[in-house]
Image (tube, rainbow, N blue to C red):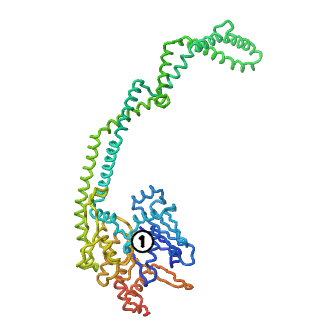
């Protein structure tokens, strides 16, 4: 929903800040006051082409900011995140700046954005009806989405698109295999030999580190035994053993402690040292007894190291990575063997195509049913909207090749008047007719949540009286489901609105400026009286305006102007 529109130095607007609410609002005012300029400003924020003429005369740049509440649009929130354009939760700010030279910059939530991104965001937020250049009703994709929404077919359309993508993937998989059969066969042969070779070697995870450590120990066994025996002998087994000599030192100092107790601190250091020397001597003796020279084991370990070195060089990996390479080789070989059967690949493709076609046929049946119902509903509404005798139809034509969107092309067709053949909407309807046709369709679709903000321009072209009342009633009903705004010259339409804005133009220093104000109850009576009465507004006209607004209390009489 559009919350706020800030316009600075745009065409004949110096500065405007408008705050909007849900339901149905109208913009009214004298012809030429600048009502459409507000819509043009919003279009600029929504990514429409920027030109230097958008900048108010004498200003350096035009600056438009539109603030939206997007808390009810989770898919749009995901789009913002995917494009790294997210801002405050539940809020989206679209901004467009155009300088006097015609160059423009766009921003979404303060992030620099392209005009295409602004347009893509705008299509999720606002639908402006009545102008061909920004009219979703003319887009084939929008027509398809409208029909699917009306028929409640969105989930089936999504599953059909998913099935089509799976079919295309399987088709590509089969084509790639057939185009690279020789290369696949060569890879299978190479991997088969490699897997067999690694299976024979049978490297285990962590084996390289274990074997390397064992080799270092075995290859230095003689030196290790000799060092252990020498250490044990010097510490406790020789005639002049260090443990014995340490004992002598301790005994001499201990005997002198009775003469000077300060020597006890030295004793406390030497006694643990003697015990540790004795323990170390015992450990060295046990190590020397366990260690042995085993030339056969050493040779076996060296052979294993050589084999792993050779395999690492052969496959260009470190010896410690051979176990992982073995697993990867076996996995890839299984993958090729499982997917390398042409018959299996063709069957997978056929199964995917059959699944897609089954979904697409269900979608087609749903669309045919929805097309007939939508055509009847819109045709009936056209009779009330000054298009008596007109017809609306949804044409479904088979596509030459299956598509992601289904098996048919969808085209909205209209005959605005009796005796005219049905033609595509974009080529047949005038601006006013197209806007009223959009109104009829949107009313039919009001139960389906789609674009949250709908803006109607020129809905009152060529109509009046009772038809205008019907248009107002339809817009008000549509406002129960969406935020609806309408630019109108018809008092019947304006009287049906929940809020009314008056657009006026004044001149300052020879330069025209547009102003907008929200009307209170008395202001609405006066404005609708102006719309009813023309040049001279009488009390009778004001009473008529009050009656149109449904006033229940007398209002202050005003002098005629």
Query: Would you call the spot at circle 1 few (<14 residues within 10 Å), some (14-19), or many (20 or more)?
Result: some
User: At 34% from the left edge and 65% from the top edge, which residue is drawn?
Assistant: 142
Between residues 173 and 334, which one lies in front from this camera angle? Answer: 173
Q: Residue furthest right?
A: 259
Between residues 408 and 296, which one lies in front from this camera angle? Answer: 408
Describe the element under mark 1 as helix, strand or loop.
loop
Percent of width and height locating residue 376: 23, 71
Percent of width and height locating residue 185: 35, 35
Question: Is residue 550 at least partly visible in the picture?
Answer: no
Percent of width and height locating residue 151: 26, 63
Quarter of the figure with the C terminus: bottom left
Query: Disc 1 designates what residue?
Result: 21
User: At 30% from the left edge and 53% from the top edge, which residue is drawn?
Assistant: 159
Percent of width and height locating residue 116: 45, 63
Quadrant position of residue 183? top left
Between residues 196 and 266, which one lies in front from this camera angle? Answer: 196
User: At 57% from the left edge and 78% from the top edge, which residue is drawn?
Assistant: 58
Question: Is residue 259 at least partly visible in the picture?
Answer: yes
Quadrant position of residue 265? top right
Please give the count of numbered marks on the rendered protein.
1
Quarter of the figure with the N terminus: bottom left
Between residues 414 and 341, which one lies in front from this camera angle? Answer: 341
């Amino acid at each position: 929903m559009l919350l706020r529109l800030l316009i600075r130095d745009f065409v004949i607007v110096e500065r405007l800040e408008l705050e909007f609410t849900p339901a149905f609002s109208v913009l009214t005012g004298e012809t030429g006051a600048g009502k459409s300029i507000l819509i043009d400003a919003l279009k600029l924020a929504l990514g429409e082409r920027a030109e230097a003429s958008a900048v108010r005369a004498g200003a350096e740049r035009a600056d438009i900011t539109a603030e939206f509440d997007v808390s009810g649009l989770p898919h749009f929130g995901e789009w913002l995140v995917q494009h790294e354009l997210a801002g405050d939760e539940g809020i989206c700010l679209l901004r467009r700046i155009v300088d006097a030279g015609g160059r423009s910059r766009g921003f979404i939530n303060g992030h620099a954005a392209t005009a295409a991104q602004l347009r893509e965001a705008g299509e999720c937020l606002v639908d402006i009806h009545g102008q061909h250049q920004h009219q979703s009703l003319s887009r084939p994709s929008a027509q398809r989405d409208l029909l699917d929404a009306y028929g409640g077919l969105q989930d089936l359309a999504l599953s059909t698109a998913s099935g089509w993508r799976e079919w295309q993937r399987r088709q590509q998989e089969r084509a790639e295999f057939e185009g690279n059969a020789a290369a696949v066969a060569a890879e299978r042969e190479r991997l088969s030999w490699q897997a067999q070779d690694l299976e024979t070697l049978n490297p285990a995870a962590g084996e390289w580190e274990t074997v390397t450590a064992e080799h270092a120990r075995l290859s230095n066994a003689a030196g290790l035994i000799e060092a252990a025996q020498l250490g044990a002998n010097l510490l406790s087994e020789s005639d002049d053993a260090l443990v014995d000599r340490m004992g002598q030192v301790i005994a001499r100092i201990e005997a002198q402690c009775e003469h000077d107790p300060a020597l006890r601190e030295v004793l406390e250091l030497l006694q643990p040292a003697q015990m540790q020397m004795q323990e170390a001597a015992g450990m060295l003796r046990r190590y020397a007894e366990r260690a042995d020279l085993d030339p056969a084991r050493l040779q076996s370990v060296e052979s294993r190291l050589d084999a792993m070195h050779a395999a690492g060089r052969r496959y260009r990996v470190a010896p410690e990575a051979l176990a992982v390479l073995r697993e990867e080789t076996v996995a890839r070989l299984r993958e090729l063997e499982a997917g390398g059967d042409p018959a299996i690949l063709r069957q997978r493709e056929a199964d995917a195509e059959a699944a897609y076609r089954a979904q697409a046929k269900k979608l087609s049946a749903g669309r045919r049913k929805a097309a007939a119902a939508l055509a009847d509903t819109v045709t009936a509404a056209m009779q009330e909207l000054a298009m008596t005798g007109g017809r609306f139809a949804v044409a479904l034509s088979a596509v030459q090749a299956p598509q992601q969107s289904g098996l048919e092309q969808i085209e909205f067709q209209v005959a605005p008047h009796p005796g005219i053949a049905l033609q595509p909407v974009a080529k047949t309807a005038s601006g006013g007719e197209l806007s009223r046709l959009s109104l009829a369709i949107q009313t039919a679709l009001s139960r389906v949540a789609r674009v949250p903000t709908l803006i109607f321009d020129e809905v009152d072209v060529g109509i009046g009286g009772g038809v205008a009342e019907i248009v107002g009633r339809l817009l008000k009903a549509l406002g129960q489901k969406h935020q609806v705004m309408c630019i109108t010259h018809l008092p019947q339409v304006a009287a049906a609105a929940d809020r009314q804005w008056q657009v006026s133009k004044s001149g300052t220093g020879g330069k025209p400026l547009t102003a907008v104000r929200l009307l209170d109850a008395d202001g609405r009576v006066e404005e609708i009286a102006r719309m009813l009465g023309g040049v001279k507004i009488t009390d009778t006209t004001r009473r008529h305006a009050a009656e149109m607004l449904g006033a229940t209390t007398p209002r202050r009489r005003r002098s005629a102007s």
